[in-house]
Amino acid sequence: MSSDKILVFVPAYNCAAQIGRVLGQFSAPETRAHFHTILILDNQSRDGTAAAAIKARDALGLHNCIVGRNVANYGLGGSHKAAFTYAREHGFTHVVVLHGDDQGSIADLLPILARGAHRSHDACLGARFMAGSQLAGYSKFRIFGNYVFNTLFSIGSGRAVYDLGSGLNIFSRPFFDDARIARYSDDLPFNVFLLLGAFDARRKLMFFPISWREDDQVSNVKMMSQATKTLTILFDYVFRRKVMRNTDHRATPVAEYRFEMLDNQSQVLSAQR
């Protein structure tokens, strides 16, 4: 019997229209069986995302799913930190990240779990831009830009990079236990810090191809601003590594990343542990 205790963390922000489809990916018992708990973590959405998640959860009968809301808008990185804290406190061995906007598919991760790659690597990272990946709704310009950045990061880090941060990954306990993560940026560049921090710590990583689509999603990425920030982070990694390691990269440091449960499903799960 596997000793894995896997948390699926679904960061959700203004995705009421998509969150039901994300939860629908776990409707098959054979898929659901891989995961101990599904945590939908709403980051102060304004469109009723949390209510939509609870409604979908109940309709699907996902008894291992809980819904929470951050006590403040922490950003994507801050939501990760809140989920990692929850995973540590509740003894999870791994955290799966699956974004709540229904761009990725949990099915792409199942072969990784089946062959046990998540146990032999500190992190397995979904990659949209490697052989075997499938993209739908991406412009040629965006695809080209991502290949350019992946090449720059591969050269700068000395490691093959196929994605700077997709919305489908699995992290082991040693990975998300790293205290340095608390100092990484709370906004979208968090994933870049997470990747370069893992390289710096000599973590054992692997990339795997995933399918990715954009249908009715609304991107929160401002491309030029994001590109500038990303290149600055790479410059610091290559030329100012020590400073990068010791700097708090958050715009506003937070003492504790907390969220509140929005229904009593967490009590049910606690009783089942």
Image (tube, rainbow, N blue to C red):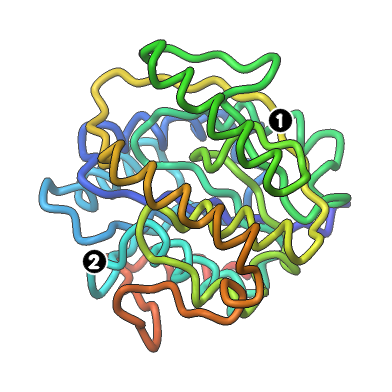
- Can you say which quadrant of the picture contains the C terminus? bottom right
Residue that label 2 marks = 73
Q: Is residue 26 above or below residue 215?
A: below
Residue under the point 27% across and 59% down: 43
Between residue 78 and residue 191, name the one nearer to us: 191
Report the disc number at residue 173.
none
Between residue 17 and residue 242, name the one nearer to us: 242
- Amino acid under disc 2: Asn
Q: Secondary structure at mark 2?
A: loop
Inter-mark Cα distance, 1 to 2: 31 Å
Residue occupying the far bottom of the picture:
255
Q: Are marks 1 and 2 in contact (CB under 8 Å)?
A: no
- Asked if residue 219 shows in the view, the reply is yes
Residue that label 1 marks = 208
Q: Is residue 56 above or below residue 185?
A: above
Residue under the point 83% across and 53% down: 204
Question: Residue 251: image x %, image y %?
Answer: 31, 73
Residue under the point 83% across and 59% down: 3
Residue 169 as seen in the image, left or right of residue 119: left
Question: Residue 270: image x %, image y %?
Answer: 53, 73
